[in-house]
Image: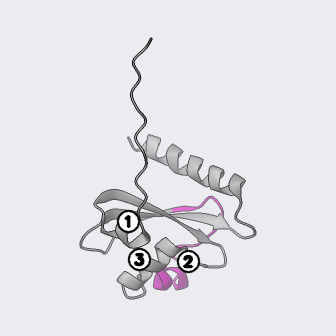
Amino acid sequence: MLDSNPIPSPEVLTVTGILEQQSDVLVAGLTEEGSLSSTLDAVNEMTGGWIKRLIKDGEIRGKRSELTLLASPLDSGPRMLLVVGLGSGELDRHLAFESGAMVVRLSLIHI
């Protein structure tokens, strides 16, 4: 019988836990209407409205398949924030898979 390596269990973190954990990149979605995900809302609160200002200024949009990589203004936690445009309409399983695949492709380019 072949020895197998056990698959590690993913660690489930709250939004605030994610923002406090050291990492290279935090990925969060944004709809075209400008609705903030719970993650982006937490970043916005921690930065005094930084995310909403970027949306208002047109620096980030929620256009489907648009990726925006930002240096994090936070002193700790993730060094970068990758905003994934989710477009308008219903957020469904297909969109989640498509967005995740896009992020993986981007990460492979930069390895």
Is residue 88 in view from this perspective?
yes
List the residue tagged with mark 1.
18
Q: Secondary structure at mark 2?
A: loop
Which residue sits furthest right? 89
Distance CA(mark 3)–CA(mark 1) = 10 Å
Q: State which quadrant residue 17 falls in.
A: bottom left
Q: Quadrant of the C terminus?
A: top left
Question: For the residues marked 2 and 3, what is the alpha-carbon distance in whole angstroms?
Answer: 10 Å
State which tag comes first along the sequence, 1 or 2: 1
Between discs 2 and 3, the one toward the N terminus: 2
Q: Residues within 10 Å of mark 1 (few under 14, many from 20)?
A: some
**Residue stretch rendered in magenta on the structure:** 51-67
The residue type indicated by label 3 comes to Val
Q: Residue furthest bottom?
A: 48
Report crowding for label 3: few under 14, some 14 to 19, many 20 or more residues within 10 A (C-alpha): many
The three-letter code of the residue at mark 2 reads Leu
Q: Is residue 71 visible?
A: no
Q: Residues within 10 Å of mark 2 (few under 14, many from 20)?
A: some
Find the residue positioned furthest to the left.
75
- Total numbered circles: 3
Dot placed on the residue nearer the N-terminal end, 3 or 1: 1
Gap between marks 1 and 2 measured at Cα: 16 Å
